[in-house]
Image: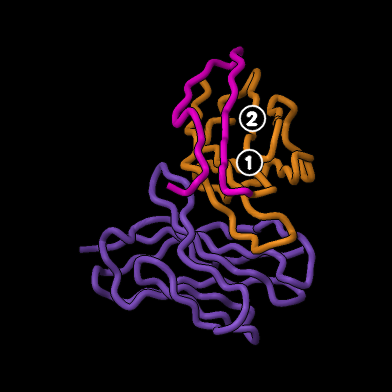
Chain colours: A purple, B orange
Amino acid sequence: AQSVTQPDIHITVSEGASLELRCNYSYGATPYLFWYVQSPGQGLQLLLKYFSGDTLVQGIKGFEAEFKRSQSSFNLRKPSVHWSDAAEYFCAVAAGASGGSYIPTFGRGTSLIVHP
Amino acid sequence: ETGVTQTPRHLVMGMTNKKSLKCEQHLGHNAMYWYKQSAKKPLELMFVYSLEERVENNSVPSRFSPECPNSSHLFLHLHTLQPEDSALYLCASSQDRAGRTEAFFGQGTRLTVV
């Protein structure tokens, strides 16, 4: 079964600084990988996804993530954080085309705090 | 707007009440999910329906009863809840094994049990 680890519970950055949120997964083959964002009291919104192909994927709101098979990682990055990016970020993994559970498994989430 | 609509957005109920949460999707998806999100806890998968058949039930207490009358609608019937059941209940949908599996979420129902 697949699993996801987000090692950072909280991350604090200054507005305008760069950001990297870490995500590691455990799965036997190449999975489908996702990053979601959740604003307070809201549902989860998809930021970006990786299914296959180019390992650097671009998402909405200026976010990108890089799939590194050798490290079993899918870290989320943004070059310059805005105050509105303060939210909870979730990494998720689902089985890829090789089969297995299609049900997405979520990490515990990383809370992003942005200082002015 | 994600294509997944949940009602009501907020619900306050007593421990002896019976209420239902509703979820609706018109994305043509075959799988629908209920998640529970409590403060300071990870997302807990409660139920999964695939093609209207329940395929996963993660040891959820019987006071939560799901219903999936068709592929577009999912309900969560609640009765004799406990205060610790207060949480944000999220509904999601996705394509089944046949396709890409990104999940689309509703905005959630904030449930408070008093």
Q: Which residue is mark 2?
A: B76
Which chain hosts label 1? Answer: B
Out of B97 and B41, give the one closest to the viewer: B97
Q: Specify the segment rendered in magenta.
A: B1-28
Q: Tell me, yes or no, whether the highlighted magenta stretch contains residue B18.
A: yes
Residue B103 point in image, percent of width and height: 59, 54
In the image, is residue A83 above or below residue A97? Answer: above
Q: In the image, what residue type sits under mark 2?
A: Leu
Element under disc 1 = strand
Q: Residue at x 60, y 58 (%)?
A: A106
Q: Is residue A15 visible?
A: yes
At label 1, counting other C-alpha atoms closer than 10 Å, the crowd grade (few under 14, some 14-19, many 20 or more) is: many
Taking the image as shown, residue B85 lies to the left or right of residue B64, namely left
| Snapshot quadrant of residue B57 | top right
Q: Residue at x 63, y 53 (%)?
A: B94
In the image, is residue A86 above or below residue A14? Answer: above
The disc placed on residue B79 is: none
The disc placed on residue B34 is: 1
Q: In the image, what residue type sits under mark 1?
A: Trp
